Structure formats: structure tokens, C-alpha cells
Amino acid sequence: MHEKTGLLIPCRNVAANISGLLDSLDPALLEDITEILCIDNHSADGTAQTLLDKQSKRSAAYSGKLTVIQNSRDYNYGGSLKIGFRYFVENDFDWVIVLHSDDQGDSNTILQNFKRARQEHPDSDMIIASRFEAQSDVSGYSTSRVLGNLFFNLLTRVTTGLRISDGGAAVAMTRISVLKRIPFFQITSGLHFHPQLNILIYSLPDLKIREIPLRWKDSNVGSSVRVVRYSWTLILMLVGFVFRKMAGKRGAHLFDPNDPAFDPVFAVSRSPVDAQKN
């Protein structure tokens, strides 16, 4: 039986890049993708219109598979992922793959590596493309970001006891059944979304998680992440995690800030061709 696999691409101010990314996707790899969900997080550069224009392109390899969500306001990076995860949960998908909308990694290589890992390890619950797996290549990634992430990975191991090679890993393929087991809608909507999500997932018992190598570089479309501030707030998050766990807190309550009242408003535009036929 064919498993339904969703491809989730959060977008904000990437009009110059998203068109080329979609057009570059290998048709052979897209055969395994049931639906592509691009979420525009209230961009100011015409990203939403670019996506809607691509949606009407009938000759593209992704024709009939592209769904566009337009957030009514800026819900932050994590907020867009929450919306996307819930979409795939509510539409009975089996897997979700998260890709970035910039050029930090080659999308086709990532999708091919996920496909290979899934075939070689069909019992996997989650496959993470780790920037710090032994065979990964971060030579194009700034030294400050590499060092900052390595420090965070070490601190994550010390404070949580979890062996995560890339605590902030964002590019991953996850079973929907795993997402149903964690309160992802209640953790932060900010840039700490993935560190919090990964800690909660790695804390689940009996999960089979595979890590695969990733070639990663700095984005040419800019970044909203300020390394020093981001690193400092991560330290505070992990220290707070330790004390909250000692106090008996669980789930999203292990983190501050969390977002228990997240209630987004957005518009959904589906492809003229029924994506579910695939």
C-alpha cells in the first residue's frame, strides 16, 4: 500500500528563490511525494503570488501536487511548521518531509538520501539530515554558526542526556504517528521550535531514529537568526528545561516560552488538479 508523504516548505521573503527550487525538483523523486505544501508566512516580497503562479503551471513536475497556505500575519518560523504539521495530521498522511526554501542544501540530494535511508531502514520512525553526522559537509557554513551549533549540541547532551548529533536539525522525514505523540502545537512558535521538537521526539521511548549526512552552507537570501542572541536564548532554554524537569513538568511545559494558545488564521489554496489522486 502506498504511503502518503507530504513535503513541507515554510517560506518567508523567498520570492527570488522559491520558483527555482520548485522547478528544480526531480520528477522521479516527486513520484514518491503525494502533496507539496508551501506556507507563506506573510512575506513582503511577493512570495505568496509567486507560489500561486507556480500552482497554475500545469506542465510542471509538481503539477496537481502544490498546495499554498498564506498566513494572515507573521506566525514566525515555528508557527508555519505547526500549521503544516497539523495539516498533514488532519489529512491522514503517513510521513512529512521538511525542506528549507532557501539554497542551504541541495533539495534533490536531500530527497534522494531520505528515499535511500527509508528503503534501507523501513522500520525508521524519523530520519534526520544532520549537519554534524560523520560524513556531513559544512565547509560552506560560517565558522561562527558551526561552533555555535557544536556548543549547543554538547550542552543539549549534558542537560537532557539525549544523544542528538544535531539538536537544531530542521531537515527531517518524520512519521505522522510520531507527531501525534507530542504536543508540537504548544511549543514555541519561534526559532527554537526545532530544538524543542527534537528534544521531545528523542525523549519518546522505543523510537527508531536514523541520522544521515547533509551538505550545508550559508544561505544567499539572508537569515533572520542572530548567532549570539540565538545561542544565549538556547542556553537559557536548556537550563530552564533542567529545572522544569526536576520540578515534574512534562511536554511543552518543559520549555519557556511555549505557546499553548496558538490559534492561527490562514488561507488555503489547493492545486486545480486533485493532489490526492497520487
Image (cartoon, rainbow, N blue to C red):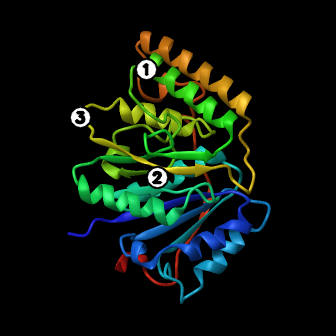
Location of residue 20 in the rendering, given as x and y in whole percent from the top left corner: 64, 73
Residue 257 visible here: yes
Location of residue 227 in the rendering, given as x and y in whole percent from the top left corner: 71, 33
List the residue tagged with mark 3.
Answer: 206
List the residue tagged with mark 1.
Answer: 160
Q: Do the residues under discs 1 and 2 have CB atoms within 8 angstroms?
A: no
Image depth: mark 3 or mark 2 in front: 3
Which comes before the other along the chain, label 1 or label 3? Answer: 1
Q: Amino acid at mark 3?
A: Asp
- Gap in angstroms between the C-alphas marked 1 and 3: 17 Å
Farthest right residue in view: 44
List the residue tagged with mark 2.
Answer: 85
Q: Amino acid at mark 2?
A: Phe
Image quadrant containing the C terminus? bottom left
> Does dot 2 land on a helix, a strand or a loop?
helix
Q: Say whether residue 161 is left or right of residue 53.
A: left
- Gap in angstroms between the C-alphas marked 1 and 2: 25 Å
Q: Who's the residue at 47% across and 75% down the image?
A: 26
> Does dot 1 land on a helix, a strand or a loop?
helix
The quadrant where residue 113 appears: bottom left
Q: Amino acid at mark 1?
A: Thr
Location of residue 3 in the rendering, given as x and y in whole percent from the top left corner: 28, 65
The quadrant where residue 105 appears: bottom right
